[in-house]
Image: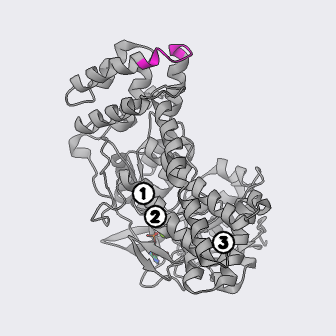
Amino acid sequence: MPVTLPFDNSYARLPDRFYARVAPTPVRAPKLVKLNRALARKLNLDPDWLESPEGLEMLAGNRIPDGSEPIAMAYAGHQFGQFVPQLGDGRAILLGEVIGRDGVRRDIQLKGSGPTPFSRQGDGRAAIGPVLREYLVSEAMAALGVPTTRSLAAVLTGEVVIRDRFLPGAVLTRVARSHIRIGTFQYFAVRGDFEALQQLADYAIARHYPEVAEADHPYRAFLDAVVKAQAELVPKWLLIGFIHGVLNTDNTSIAGETIDYGPCAFMDTYSPTTVFSSIDYHGRYAYGNQPQIVHWNLVRFAETLLPLLSDDQDKAVAMAQEAIDTYPKLFEAAYHAGLRRKLGLETARDHDLDLIHDLLKAMAENGADFTLTFRNLSEAVADPAADEQVRSLFTDPAAYDAWAPRWRQRLADEPGDPAARRQAMRAANPMFIPRNHRIEAVINAAVDDKDYAPFEELLAVLSRPYENQPAFALYAQPPEPHERVLKTFCGT
Ligand code: AMP
Ligand code: MG
């Protein structure tokens, strides 16, 4: 029986040079690891069908459903600051787009689905480890309230992939508002293909920022909108301790979603210089560098739009500069508002930032756990007896003792009662983040013992990050020294 999914493939209707038409390469013995049933329903897809043998064939890339027009998208990008004029989907294939129950159009993409014309030396495949990491972290990010691509399914291929050792192969089904990146614009800009550039801009406007089409200068308004989306995304990362790990321009989404979970990780002890990625030798993409890096990426984006901004080069540059210059203020406004919320401050006062920075400084100097410090402050705000749970996170608890009275004095100026403040703080300060040692343990259980129970349990805990979940209190704990995982790998 032919299978028809409600695909409507707008990107595949763009000109041929935007992509390569290529089908996934079938795999030997597909096995479903996980289906995200709630997400399937949100997408208007039938979870029971997706779990059926036919659905599994699609999720593994063994069967192309009617209505799908598989393509690998072309893009370029700056990788660690070096421009690469052609990257493209080397191990991912877009099956098509669906319109969800919320009316939003989303891409359904298989990642790890075999070689494409953009694979270069790569095998086009993915190992189970990175697939589980992406599944866990992207779903955790969604539950934490961060714009992100989602994970619809993970399947084992029944084949091995060769990395530093033999590993089980897997395919992730990734869902995104689109897979258009800054690097997609760079791909056409570097080729001097202004016709394609304009088509891409018009497409991205219609799909992601339809309101800017009405502006006096739609392309300038488009640039403003992308700058704003990124300036609001990065603070959300910082406020929960997320480190993307590979913030190349090809991993920066035009729709403003977090995309490409490679060597990403969450920080345990607070330190702005924290780096996990095994390939980030110079700390370019360290936790605290992310705001400047995304600013730099946006400059690269603005450069691609110059020919669309004005025929007059000087005027185009001035317009681009104006748009780029809005970033620091937008970023700071969102970041500072978020930091205030983390400390239970609804109103803004002159010296709030000193108060916040002094806490962060004390945390850095005393190896305090980022997530637990703020979560425990959410209890201390209503009950000074809970101070002990905060101060014990500092190597020298006196550092907290010196700071806490200033915080309490400031809180005295706030409206509302302590119980309401605690509720507001709990909603801004997660109890559960995907800690790196937990992800590692999940991956080891899957690879070494074919045991996916730890994956299921961690995933369930992370789906309610702001709730206490006393039965899972251990998942809130930072790693013991011997459990620490300091390096993460792209695993490509
Ligand atoms: P990433 O580091 O995941 O952003 O990928 C950077 C580029 O390398 C993209 O063009 C990917 O498609 C490509 N790539 C990564 N891993 C593989 C692989 N196993 N096979 C083919 N291409 C890959
Ligand atoms: Mg990428």
Pick the front one: 53 or 106: 106
Answer with mark 2 or mark 3, whichever residue precedes in sequence. Answer: 2
Q: Is residue 259 left or right of residue 435?
A: right
Badge 1 is on which residue? 292
Instruction: Rate crowding at label 2 as few (under 14), some (14 to 19) or many (20 or more) other CA atoms within 10 Å.
Output: some
Q: Which mark is residue 257?
A: none
Percent of width and height locating residue 165: 31, 71
Q: Is mark 3 within 8 Å of ligand 2?
A: no
Badge 3 is on which residue? 309
Residue 26 shows in the view: yes
- The quarter of the picture where the N terminus appears is bottom right
Quarter assignment of residue 492: bottom left
Disc 2 marks a residue whose amino acid type is: Trp
Disc 3 marks a residue whose amino acid type is: Leu
Badge 2 is on which residue? 296
Pick the front one: 20 or 470: 20
| Labels 2 and 1 touching (C-beta < 8 A) | yes
Answer with mark 3 or mark 1, whichever residue precedes in sequence. Answer: 1
Disc 1 marks a residue whose amino acid type is: Gln
| Labels 2 and 3 touching (C-beta < 8 A) | no
Q: Look at the numbered disc 3 and give the secondary structure of its residue.
A: helix
> Does the segment drawn in magenta span residue 418?
yes
Q: Look at the numbered disc 1 and give the secondary structure of its residue.
A: helix
Residue at image x 36%, y 17%? Answer: 386
Instruction: Rate crowding at label 3 as few (under 14), some (14 to 19) or many (20 or more) other CA atoms within 10 Å.
Output: many
Please give the range of residues in magenta.
Answer: 410-419
**Separation of disc 2 and disc 3 at Cα?**
19 Å
**Separation of disc 2 and disc 1 at Cα?**
6 Å
Pick the front one: 151 or 418: 418
Q: Is mark 2 within 8 Å of ligand 1?
A: no
**Separation of disc 3 and disc 1 at Cα?**
24 Å
